[in-house]
Amino acid sequence: MLNRRHLHALAGAYALDALDGAERDRFERHLRRCPACEREVRGFAATAAALAMAAAAEPPPRLRDRVLAATAVTRQSPPDVARRGAARAATRPGVTRSPWVPRVALAVGGAGLAAAAALGVVQVATQHQLDSALARNQEIATVLAAPDARIAAAPTSVGGTTVVVVSRAEQKLVFTSAGLPALPPEKVYELWLLGPGTARPAGLLPPPSGGKTAPVLASGVLADDKVGVTVEPVGGTSSPTTTPIVVMTLPA
Amino acid sequence: MGPFRSASDPAERSDSELDKLLMLVARGDREAFEGVYDRLAGPVYGLIRKVLRDPAQSEEVAQEVLLEVWRTASRFDPGRGSAAAWALTIAHRRAIDRVRSETAAAERELRSASAQVAIDEVAESVEASLEAERVRRCLEGLTELQRESITLAYYGGYSYPQVAALLDTALGTIKTRIRDGLTRLRDCLGVSW
């Protein structure tokens, strides 16, 4: 009894994330069986949200670009069907949790891993397989979420816009486009990394859908590289055969 | 800085607007997400920055959090609180994760030496927005121990045993002061949940 009263009293500290490991786990177990506590925690969380609102500060504008760009290549988690169902109470502790029953921080070390977790590695860990498409998406997401990611956009000579997000630390870039003219079936847009006096093929743009091309990831980006796009025969070529429709200088 | 800067009435309205936007986001609506971003980025970034202090690290964590909002929007359940509370819970938790991670531990030690600063800064940082003004007034209505416990735990990112040590007060006392203080704050703010 005394024990339970002790647990009740932790609702405030819990709502402020002020409990450590074991105590938090204990309180969360208790929460699942205590609707009154859950209600109280919910009210406290709303109160804490007001404290957060009062601390609002203008983030750097580049954050918006980056986050919005990343949504294009970040798969969303499916709804938690089990949690919404009636069988909710039967779920194993620690597996399915509501947002109010927070998950213990993943025991990851660096910021990079934390970013990867935020971008979907967590989700993958619960899947049986990691297919290559998803892996590629994650690689793209990693570039977009890189702390040093920079974005640049440029119009092309044939219309439309190309967008590049580059991470110097990762030596990778993600390339997308919007509004490029459709090509005849025997032609393709090819992406190039243009160094001083060299042009390295960096992939073919997939056919546009809805006017946009899906993101293409290019690795091995060097300090002096620019990015260019040419129109080439289907299958691509090993060096450009036409004048680039765009050449972009990468942001530092 | 957007709709959260409004008085209680419009704030509530924009709150439910945010709920609706977030439900659209759950279905993959990126335009709706822009609206969510514009309403939440300020509080998310501000809160994280308050806890972490370091602007670069704060930006990084804010980015993770805002993407997590995009990614897990389908987990938001309007029956269990507002979208703002849901997102800010994530934001605070991620900031705390960072604070309690090993890499931050050393820096943490240094900071605990200047805990008093944390308390003073809270009052000072509260901007001249109506919402902030309301929160400030309600914070002032708490006892000193309640206020210090809550601000050190929430804005300072300290666990309640750390708060107890900083304020040189018994663990059980801090625990109850946090709870009583939050109850009073909740009632003063007229928070609906």
Image (cartoon, coloured by chain):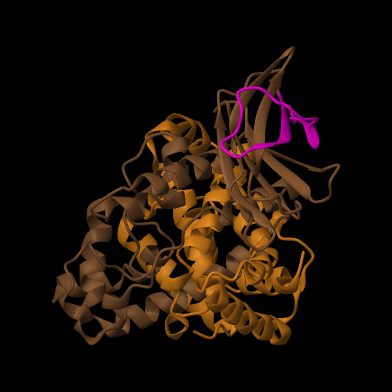
Where does the image place residue B78, in percent across and percent down from the top left? 47, 82
- When asked about the image quadrant of residue B25, the answer is bottom right
The C terminus of chain A, quarter of image: top right
Was residue A227 drawn as part of the magenta stretch in this picture? yes
Q: Is residue A36 visible?
A: yes
The chain coloured brown is A
| Rendered colour, chain B | orange
Instruction: Determine the residue located farthest toward the right in the rendered image.
Output: A157
Range of magenta residues = A226-252
The image shows residue A226, relative to residue A94, as above or below, that is above
Image location (x, y in percent) of residue A155: 83, 45
**Residue at 69% across, 75% down:** B134
| Frontmost residue, A21 versus B148 | A21
Which residue reaches farthest top? A197
Q: Position of residue A147 (x, y in %)?
A: 59, 36
Looking at the image, is A62 positioned above or below residue A83?
above
